[in-house]
Image (cartoon, helix red, strand yellow):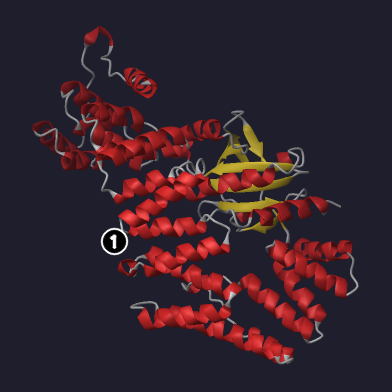
């Protein structure tokens, strides 16, 4: 009941009042094309396609908005108060363009047709921008209730529990996979279940389910799931990886070369392991040095085995009495992407070379220091203070800088992991900046922060200004900048499996202050 009252109060705030003296609002001056479409809409105001054509006939500003178009819809809502399509059409447009004006129109439409699942789904999408998860779950629950056979609604309803109720998220996602065996949403649910666990056994169980869904073989989710299954097997059991890759070649209707490349790498791992067992580490190292994990710039699916390959090479080099080569191999990779596994190995080989932990740390930092570049400064609008903030304002601190925007799902997925790591550091020593790439979503920024409690300092990116070496190819794009204002790490992504990497990046940058 409380939720219903809140909705009604919200609707009551969204009334279309006529100007003073009860005169009707002035009609907009549409283009010739929109004028013709206007007549079509008024002849049949329930036709959604005509509404969409009318909206698309307007020239929109940089925010994808047009005051005349919106004014016309306010007029029509008064003129046709019982026509669902009118508030729905403009609300739908605003959601798709991620403009923070959609909710009142869509709520108006939901009163006219409360059993229409699509309007509740659009309201859920709108709530996503401010990260109001409770409201989003409520709307998605209604969408699922009124369209129980819609795989999209069921998938997103399950996904809404990922951060708040992991147990329910798991059970609902498995239900999506079970109830929609022919839908891509079913295999996508399994893929995300695998991605959201750090336990290898659980990942393998989900990947096996993906592999068994033969009806989804042409889905990208199926392809990505089976690829990640192979890559995981390559790390823990190359023989099983080889067998699985061979099976995919024999069964597959596409991407045969992709699987051939993977089988070749697994075969090399097996042969190298055999040479090591036969006490021929030089031959093993020679084989491993020929391994090609792919090149994303050439459009290939890179084999996720960079760390395991580096550790394998180091093991072979050390066995061949080339411990310095083993150390250097790991030092180069660790300087870019520190992990727990690399950390343990590099200190082990450093110790064999007579290096103490301080010497190892200095060697690592020397590599980073030689490649660090002064970050381009900026002066950007601060959403909290209303004034300008510059990068140099934070000099003396380690800076985690991320480009994002409220409608960016990968950004929202990354934020909890940033927060999990940053709580381990003193705010006087580490600054956290979030640069919104899309000023058109400015109105979502502060509500998003209020709803989530995230701690980054929100700044508005200047899209028209060159960013030098702080360019953003998309969102999220992340940088870690040292106390001297130099870029030390860039291009990294953080999730549940590699939070430790960000922690090591920050901790070791702080330790290298002098």
Q: Position of residue 489 (x, y in %)?
A: 68, 57
Q: Residue furthest top?
A: 21
Q: Residue at x 43, y 47 (%)?
A: 159
Observer able to see residue 478: yes
**Helix or strand or loop: what does disc 1 sit on?**
loop
Q: Position of residue 368 (x, y in %)?
A: 75, 62
Quadrant that contains the N terminus: top left
Question: From the viewer's perspective, is 488 left or right of 173?
Answer: right
Residue 503: percent from left, percent from top: 70, 52
366 or 169: nearer the viewer:
169
Is residue 326 found left or right of 125 in the rendered image? right
In the image, residue 60 sits, relative to residue 205, either above or below, namely above
The extreme left residue here reads 43
493 in relation to 432, above or below: below
Instruction: Tell me which corner region of the image, top left, top right, bottom left or bottom right, holds residue 407.
Output: top left
Quarter where residue 458 is shown: top right
Q: Residue at x 70, y 87 (%)?
A: 276
Determine the image quadrant of residue 62: top left
Residue placed under numbered mark 1 in the picture: 182
């Amino acid at each position: 009941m409380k939720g219903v009252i809140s909705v009604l109060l919200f609707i009551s705030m969204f009334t279309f009042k006529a100007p003073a003296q009860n005169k009707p609002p002035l009609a907009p001056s549409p283009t010739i094309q929109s004028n013709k479409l206007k007549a079509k809409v008024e002849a049949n105001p329930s036709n959604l396609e005509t509404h969409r054509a009318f909206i698309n006939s307007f020239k929109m500003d940089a925010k994808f908005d047009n005051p005349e178009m919106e004014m016309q819809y306010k007029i029509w809502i008064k003129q046709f108060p019982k026509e669902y399509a009118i508030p729905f059409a403009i609300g739908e447009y605003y959601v798709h363009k991620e403009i923070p004006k959609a909710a009142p129109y869509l709520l108006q439409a939901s009163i006219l047709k409360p059993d229409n699942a699509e309007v509740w789904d659009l309201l859920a999408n709108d709530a996503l921008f401010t990260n109001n998860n409770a409201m989003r779950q409520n709307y998605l629950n209604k969408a699922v209730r009124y369209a129980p056979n819609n795989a999209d609604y069921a998938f997103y309803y399950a996904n809404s529990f990922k951060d708040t109720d992991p147990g329910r998220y798991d059970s609902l996602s498995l239900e999506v996979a079970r109830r929609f065996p022919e839908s891509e949403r079913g295999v996508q649910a399994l893929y995300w279940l695998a991605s959201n666990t750090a336990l290898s056994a659980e990942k393998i169980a989900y990947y096996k389910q993906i592999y068994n869904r033969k009806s989804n073989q042409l889905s990208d989710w199926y392809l990505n799931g089976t690829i990640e299954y192979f890559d995981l097997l390559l790390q823990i059991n190359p023989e099983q990886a080889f067998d699985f890759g061979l099976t995919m070649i024999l069964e597959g209707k596409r991407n045969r070369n992709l699987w051939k490349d993977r089988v070749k790498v697994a075969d090399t791992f097996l042969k190298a392991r055999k040479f090591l067992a036969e006490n021929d580490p030089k031959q093993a190292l020679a084989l491993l040095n020929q391994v090609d994990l792919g090149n994303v710039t050439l459009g290939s699916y890179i084999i996720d085995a960079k760390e395991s390959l580096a550790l394998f090479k180091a093991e072979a080099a050390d066995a061949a009495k080339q411990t310095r080569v083993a150390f250097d191999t790991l030092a180069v990779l660790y300087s870019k992407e520190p992990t727990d596994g690399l950390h343990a190995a590099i200190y082990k080989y450093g110790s064999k070379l007579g290096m103490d932990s301080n010497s190892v740390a200095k060697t690592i930092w020397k590599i980073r220091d030689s490649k660090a570049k002064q970050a381009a400064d900026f002066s950007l609008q601060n959403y909290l203070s209303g004034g300008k903030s510059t990068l140099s304002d934070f000099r003396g601190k380690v800076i985690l800088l991320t480009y994002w925007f409220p409608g960016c799902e990968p950004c929202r997925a990354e934020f909890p992991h940033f927060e999990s790591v940053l709580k381990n550091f003193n705010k006087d020593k580490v600054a956290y900046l979030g640069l919104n790439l899309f000023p058109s979503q400015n109105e979502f920024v502060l509500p998003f922060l209020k709803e989530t409690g995230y701690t980054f300092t929100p700044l508005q990116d200047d899209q028209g200004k060159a960013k030098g070496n702080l360019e953003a190819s998309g969102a999220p794009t992340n940088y870690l900048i040292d106390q001297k204002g130099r870029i030390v790490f860039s291009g990294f992504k953080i999730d549940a499996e590699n939070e430790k990497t960000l922690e090591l990046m920050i901790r070791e940058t702080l330790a290298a202050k002098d």
